[in-house]
Amino acid sequence: MKKNNQQAWTRRTFINTLTGAGTVLAMNPLLSWSGDAANPDEIDPRVTTIVANTIGVDTHNHIDVPLDAAELPGPTVDLAGEMKKSGLSAICMTFAVDYQQLRNPGDAYNRFITGLDAMDQMLQSNNLKRSMNLADLRSAYTKHQPALIQSVEGGHFLEGHLDRLGVAYNRGLRHLGLLHDNDASLPLGDVYTKPAQYGGLTAFGADVIRECNKLGILIDLTHCSNDTINAALKLTTHPVLISHTGLDTQLGQNENMAKMMRPRLISKEQAKRVANAGGVIGVWTHLADSTLAYAQNIRALVDVIGVDHVCIGTDTKLTPAYRSAASFGSRPGGLAPQPGGSNPGTPPQDGRPGNASQNGPGGRNSGRIGERTNEAWQDQQAGFYYAVVDALLKTGFSEDEIGKIGGGNFCRVFDSATSSHK
């Protein structure tokens, strides 16, 4: 395995560190081929070996949960089973509290706490635990269990109270998306899809970054304007993550989708600034209509900033969508946003708002193609990570490079951030 100044945290690294041997733990259930693969003979035979030898991490995966305490505990979901199917070893499981309007002081915080309560119960029912640091990721691996890193998309729950970061840390938060689509009641910085009005990072946003550095929380600068990112890079004492984006040169074949997503993409120049500061950038599955197109989008970013600074951040859902009945019709046109979910303004899965049998409290549906992690592409015939590894091989990446992109680069910045806690 190649060595450089930035250690490649691959699954082989875990095995060597933990057992002192280079043999693969072949009986690990996370390493089994997806039983849903329609044509396994068409997959490169090296795929299962590489999945076994590399740690696969999705750095931005939405796990839908109720954000209204009256709807707890929420639906029963097979999170462990979906992870096994995917081939991923870990996900940063995230949710957002700003899809419905935040009208009153305390709304954001109450939704945040309820979301954590729901995730507590989901993890308990799946016999899983949150990973607080790299040592926990290693421990989960040795126990043949999926690793879950708690994230939230947007600091809305803080509502100007810095001490709430400590509360969140004690509840297991280790990955904070500084901004999301809508401004917090006390803004933290300029959002890249809104007109700039704060000059980049706000004073409170700067305080949040300092506190995250002190506590040991990884900072995610997705949704931040360039000025916000640049100010954060000057301030942070640890490398940052931009978990889900893509190069603004990779627009795909769908013109309408490209127009909508264009403001959310990163330029080559800005990507280089993040990489030069030691950061890592995740490539999402949006704007790629096949596994090969996704691998090519990864290749395009690697060609700009190097293989040590690219990771996977799908912005999809491993588990089924959850929609509260209270959210129906809350957006123009009858679109039902998803409590705790991704892609605001996504139509309900049957195309009709308010179908309680599928979309109400506890309602579940497999969703549209592109929404679910294991159904990210129309032609996907295997679990997510298996399919991606196969496409990366076809795009010319080596096993060591796949190990870095698949999870090693994320593990490096996650370790740097979380090991800072004293």
Image (spheres, rainbow, N blue to C red):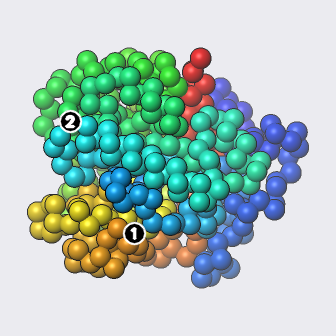
Q: Residues within 10 Å of mark 2 (few under 14, many from 20)?
A: few
Report x, y in % for residue 163: 38, 22
- Above or below, comparing residue 103 to residue 35 in the picture: above
- Name the side, left or right, on which 286 lies relative to 413: left
Q: Is residue 342 visible?
A: no
Residue most extreme to the right: 21
Secondary element at image label 2? loop
Q: Amino acid at mark 2?
A: Pro
Q: Quarter of the image containing the N terminus?
A: top right
View extreme (front): residue: 70
Side (left or right) of 229 relative to 168: left
Percent x, y for residue 97? 30, 47
Q: Quarter of the image containing the C terminus?
A: top right
**Can you say whether 237 is above or below 414 in the image?**
above
Q: Which mark is residue 350?
A: none
Q: Amino acid at mark 1?
A: Gly
49 relative position to 169: left or right: right
Label 1 to label 2, Cα distance in Å? Answer: 27 Å
Provide the residue designation for mark 1: 362
Vertical placement of residue 162 versus 346, above or below: above
Q: Does any portion of residue 138 appear in the rendered image?
A: yes
Query: The residue tagged with tag 1: helix, strand or loop?
Result: loop
**Measured from the top left, where is residue 71 in percent x and y?**
36, 60
Image location (x, y in percent) of residue 393:
61, 60
- Considering only vertical position in the picture, is 94 above or below 18? below
Q: Which residue is mark 2?
A: 105
Q: Quadrant of residue 10?
A: top right
Residue 284 is left or right of residue 248, and the answer is: right
**In percent of the image, x 81 and y 60: which residue is there?**
26
Residue shown at 74% from the left, 54% from the top: 144
Pick the residue in front: 155 or 157.
157
